Amino acid sequence: MKTLIPKSEARRIVVQRRSELTQIDIAGKTQLIIQRLSALDEFIYAKTIHCYIASRPGEVDTRRLINYMEGWGKVIVVPKLNKRTKTFNRFNFMGWEYLVRNSEGYLEPHVGIDEDLSDIDLVIVPALAISVHGQRVGYGGGYYDKLLKKTFAPKIALAYELQIFDYIETDIHDARVDKIVTERRIITTREYAKPLST
């Protein structure tokens, strides 16, 4: 029997696990994740990639990924939180000097342009906890669920193995991802599309 874990419990477990990672752990795991991601067709053929900026403790270091994608000549779009609408606007990444720390201490653009995602070929998605079925748990704001529903582009989450669960509780508003890239494997979530045993 598979265990269905509540979102709050998944968050608590992963926050604790990530707090035990050293900077060396994060750097090593991030490098392996970037290597696996860069071998995927979705990444290779994507011209414009929407990518979050890692700001939370223990996250996969997407700052390193963004620098790597610049070397590939990718157009990189980063999010700017619109607190009024509780959605993300977009900003084409032009260098770290164009980013500032917001009131929560996270890096983001000075301004966001709009919410148009029509040119996005791939979305790199953050996850605090995630299931092999693509059920994603963030920090509870729902911002990425809204964003993911606005595009048909492939959605790939970056996570460590310690963030992966069999099943996580979901609701109707939760958007799933297509693939998960960890330091050990690539998970195609539709391959796990089976009902929970009771």
Image (cartoon, helix red, strand yellow):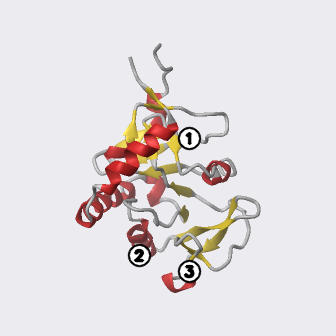
Which residue in the structure is indicated by mark 1?
A: 176
Which residue in the structure is indicated by mark 3?
A: 100
Task: Give the Cα separation between the discs numbered 3 and 1.
Answer: 30 Å
State whether residue 32 appears in this view. yes
Residue at 51% x, 54% y: name it.
125
Foreground label between 2 and 1: 1
Residue at 72% x, 73% y: name it.
113
Question: Of the residues shown, which amino acid type is indicated by label 3?
Answer: Val
Residue at 42% x, 44% y: name it.
12
Task: Give the Cα separation between the discs numbered 2 and 1.
Answer: 29 Å
For disc 2, the neighbor class at 10 Å (few under 14, some 14 to 19, many from 20) is few
Q: Furthest residue to the bottom?
A: 97
Question: Of the residues shown, which amino acid type is indicated by label 2?
Answer: Gly
Q: Which mark is residue 71?
A: 2
Decide which of tag 2 and tag 3 comes sooner along the chain. Answer: 2
Decide which of tag 3 and tag 1 comes sooner along the chain. Answer: 3
Q: Nearer the viewer, residue 154 or 135?
A: 135
Foreground label between 3 and 1: 3
Task: Give the Cα separation between the discs numbered 2 and 3.
Answer: 23 Å
Q: Position of residue 123 (x, y in %)?
A: 55, 56
Q: Position of residue 86 (x, y in %)?
A: 71, 58
Question: Of the residues shown, which amino acid type is indicated by label 1?
Answer: Arg
Decide which of tag 2 and tag 1 comes sooner along the chain. Answer: 2
